[in-house]
Image (cartoon, helix red, strand yellow):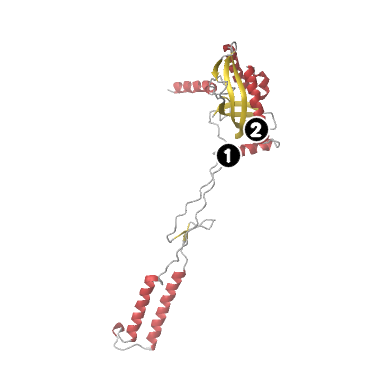
Amino acid sequence: MRRSLALVCLLVMALAPVLLVTEAWARAGGGSSSGSRGTRSYSSPAKPSTSPSQPASPVAPAPQPQRSGWGSGIMGGLAGFALGGLLGSMLFGHGMGMGGGIGFLEILLIAGGAFFLWRMFRNRQAQPAPTYGQGAGGSSWQSQPQAYEPAPTAPMASATSGDLDRGLSYIRQMDGGFDPARFSDQASDVFFKVQAAWMQRDMRSASAVLTPDMADILQKDCDRLRAQGRINRLENIAVRSVTPTEAWQEGGQDFLTVCFLASLLDYTVEESSGQVVDGSRSEPVKFEEYWTFTRPVGPNAWRLSAIQQA
């Protein structure tokens, strides 16, 4: 059992570089994913960050009703009625079974007791309602019923926006002159240079901007086209946007992935007759691709190391 498991693991490791490459005869990298992104080679590329949604306006809290205590409302009325009845009954000789009225001392005692009860009720009425879970913002849930207030909606950010920012900051630490906007321009130049070499079926003219592995992958595809007597034509290339989506460091290398949104005429012809065998001369193709560039950490030249499809 262990021997079989070991053989399966070795087979998977041997086929790993092949699994990332899917054969296609469109533009360089078109319709296929190839090359290396380090430890992220088999991860889906991160999408460009979208604009965060606007947070919902917080609902104004409903006015809180005044907290009623024991000395107000129905209970206060009942207490006052009972005390008044008791005092009147005793003053007129019917209280507590006594045959006659009460003296001045008894009146003072009753008045003192009534005042004591009034003060107790008054203090309880003035006591603030307890708060629960009060945070730094000063908000709290009162013990009295109140209108429900939904929490403000948090802005939705791209899952990788923090990763991208951290990666770019690491790159800047070792290359103070690094500029993401300038890098996007350079990536666009590489895109056109690679496509031009692809149409010539000779990647040597673009070797300076390709890693050795990527140059080898693309050249093998060019050789297959040449062997079949076909040429891939690319015309009216229009790059709509070049957006960095991922940046990281590993193994002493910088990695940076950009998303290309572009359109072009992409068709393949027979070299001998010029007859179109794939694609269209008139219908442009829109596409989204992710190109990853790498270099040794520091202010060094970037090279294309991988192309992934959306």
Q: Is residue 248 visible?
A: no
Q: Along the line of sight, which residue is nearer the eye, 54 or 212?
A: 54
Whether 255 is drawn above or below 79: the answer is above
Circle 1 sits on which residue?
161
Mark 2–mark 1 distance (CA, rounded to whole Å) = 17 Å
Residue 267 seen in the figure: yes
Rendered residue at 39%/73% (across/down): 76
Residue 292, image x, y percentages: 60, 29
State the residue position of label 2: 184
How many labels, in total? Answer: 2
Indicate whether 217 appears above or below 186.
above
The one nearer the camera, 13 or 94, is: 94
- The three-letter amino acid code for the residue at tag 1 is Ser
- Towards the viewer: 208 or 64: 64
Residue 224 x/y as whole percent? 57, 14
* Neighbour tally class for label 2: few under 14, some 14-19, many 20 plus, Cα within 10 Å: some
Q: Earlier in the sequence, mark 2 or mark 1?
A: 1
